Image (spheres, rainbow, N blue to C red):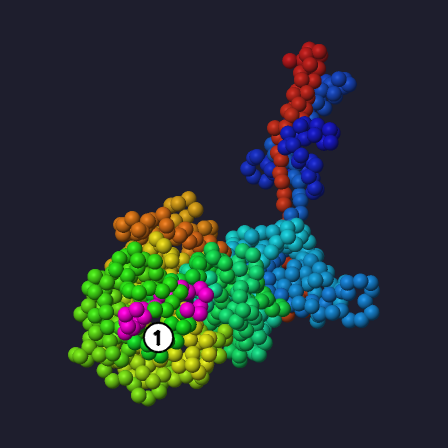
Amino acid sequence: MLLARLTELLLGLDSGFLSQEGVARLSFTPVLPGPPWAWTFGLLGVGAWWIWRCYRAELTARWGKALLGLRLCTLVLLVAALNGPELTLTRAIRQPSVVAILIDQSQSMAVADMQSAMAHAAGPSTGPATPVSIPRWQAAVGLLTSSSAGKATDSASPGELPGLLAGLAKQHEVRLYTFGNDAHLISGAAGNETGLSALKPTEDRTNLSKSLQRVTEDLAGQRLAGVVVLTDGREVPQSASANPSVTQAADHFAGQNVPVVAVVLGADRPPKNLALAGLNVQESAFANDLVLARATLSMMGMPAGNPVTVRLVNGVTGEQLAGVDGKPATTTVTPDAAGSSASGQVQVPVEVAFRPGSVGTLDVKMVVDEVQGEIDTQDNSVAARMAVMEARVVVLFVDGDPRWEYRYLKNELIRDKLIDVSCLLASADTGFAQEGDRPITRFPTTMEELATYDVIVLGDVSPRYFSDAQLRLIEEFVSQKGGGLAVVAGVRHTPGQYRGTVLEKVLPVRLGGLGTAGTVPGGAVRPFRIRPTEAGTASGFFRFLPDAQANAAYIASDLPSLFWYGQGVSAKPGVSEVYAEHPTDSGPDGRPAPLLVAGRYGAGRTIFSAIDDSWRWRYYTGESAFNTYWVQQLHWLARSRRLGQRTFALSVEKGVVEVGQNATVRLRVLDGRLLNGRPPPDVEIKDEAGMLVGKVPLVAQDSSGENWQGTWKVDRLGTLSIVDEALTRLTAGLGPQAKAGDEPEWPIVTGIRSRLELEDPRPSLQWPTEQATRSGGKVVEFSRAREEIPRLLPSRERIIPQETRQPILSSPLMLGLFIILLTLEWVGRKLKGLA
């Protein structure tokens, strides 16, 4: 090294020049015009003749010959300098052949539908390997690295072929990429598996155009022999055929004679997956109330006839909630032939009835049991929160005569241990001992007396039984105190004689269709069965059996028929909702005649029942249906009063939403005074830092003015708070009985990465085939990839000679020799006395 460096210094060469691989030789670049040989020999001839003439007299002496030799050497050195001496290093430059391998890292590559021949776990195998299902990603990694987990059952035996990385590395330099929304370089050396085994298929998008463009940019100017793509062919958000950039990339490769070879992984059958979404549970209920939990169950790849179980559990403790009959709250969903359709996906509504237990906050979690081979279990549950209140309800029941409806309902309420009832029979003689858990002798005359009750039930009692002050007291009890009022129609007084009284505006029905006499005109004489509406079915008033389908069949066919109903009424639009209607008759508004109408008035709730013979259900079928029908109504009526100062409730449909998907917020107005016919203000969306990121307008979901809903697109990861401070200010404006601090905590929505890749993760040949065809490549079967791909991609390596020239004309060695020669000759001439 020292000698080489010393030589470089003498010749004026760059450091390290002589240590490079290659062949060094001396070459010349003449500085004078014309043929070099002509002027070189001319200069040497003329110069030698002139030197001979200068020293011909001294040639007889030895020192004369020496001086002549020095002068000739100087001439030769000068002529050599004029020829521009250079030291040339010739090296062979290798331009390697490069192959890019792209392995799909999107979520659909986690689907375990690749068959792998796994070696037996213990000892040498005496029989054939056992096929097992492995994820597509694992199969792709195995194909690259020759892992036994990645060998398909129809591939070569272990040990016959190396991994695809090693096989291609024999002829090419391999660039290994993963891709999802973009391509990412993993390694630049063949066989280097650093980081590959630790990666997981988690990308939520497959952006083909961006990934392929990235590869073309990264490898621009290199001798690319081909591109290998390992994928299942699924692309989110758009198909490759609709993306011109993808075909442009293929055409670019075709123009460079670079084939795209695709290996499509995955089985051509819908993978199994169960997913729950949109759990809907009322925001509050009494302990042991019948509550309906509703959600949507998506089933994909499920064979017809294989049932799945949906359960309700406590989201905090994990304990299973009790159903209607005391057994665990479960239901079974059996996929039909729709589950085996082309898409393999079907959505069905799921409904599970349950009874909340202890008083307090209950996190209701609906869970669908995992099935073997399911691709994603993170969406197998959905949760909601509700308030569970003390079940005891205090009822004031007033009726005119001891009709059958009064007798059966009075007895049922007295027997119910969770209901305290005071009964007043208006037609009773003075001194008659009124019945009930809390016997009274008269209707309350002050709000202090009336406020001890949660619900008032008015039967077929004349309004003349009450003073005007007592009627106003009932109106104030409902509108200001949040009390409940149920009015049961009768053939004599109710509801017709209440037209024109203060209670007419409290009722959830219009009385305009009634006869002028004030009595209900002609009742039905033919038997009919009550027909619950969608809202009535969701309310639980008519849930007599645990199974929804069996319950609907029971109401339609087995529930005893009725023979009378109050005609001529219609639901008040905007403040009420029909829960049950007549199967054939129409009301004055042309719609089906209402039989049960629920509504809101001020802070309270109201119900109008047009039938007075629900006692037949108790008489013919026993206590269950009759008790459920009435107790559920009384609990619904008492809910506003028991909720205390709360005037509204905000909730979200799903607490966890994928970024890019819509989130839904629901508003339930608990106090009718809050809006007074006005639409609610927009809901505000705030991020974790409390900054406003959006507003959501709310739209009415029914005519009652109670239920509102809005949607927005979640555009970020993290937690978002759903806030409605404007409603809180309205609540504060209702007075001291409605305080903003009594409102529930704001609900939140957590944005997560999209899972669109798993909605339909079946493999697709569309864009891999298009890429391969347009670029002159091929789609290769997974089982033949190790053997076939190296043959499809011949080496494009090229060897290019490269010369490096270093001039030595001005080197220290040349200058030193020239000075030495001139100096020696000058000294010699001086010593001999020559001029």
Q: From the viewer's side, name the closer residue of 424 and 769.
A: 424
Which residue occupies 68% across, 63% down?
150
Q: Residue furthest front?
A: 431
User: Residue 765 vs residue 581: left or right?
Assistant: right
Examine the rendered structure and indicate whether residue 680 appears above or below residue 80: below
Residue 569 visible in the current orientation:
yes
Q: From the viewer's side, name the closer residue of 475 and 261.
A: 475
Quadrant occupied by the C terminus: top right
Q: Give the SS element for disc 1.
A: helix
**Amino acid type at image mark 1:** Tyr
Say which quarter of the image contains residue 585: bottom left
Range covered by the magenta-colored residues: 414-432
Which residue occupies 61% across, 54% down?
199
Say which quarter of the image contains residue 418: bottom left
User: Residue 693 vs residue 25: left or right?
Assistant: left
Q: Specify whether residue 8 is painted magenta.
A: no
Examine the rendered structure and indicate whether residue 430 appears above or below residue 491: above
The residue carrying mark 1 is 406
Which residue occupies 28% across, 64% down?
443
Residue 753 at what x, y percent from top left? 49, 56
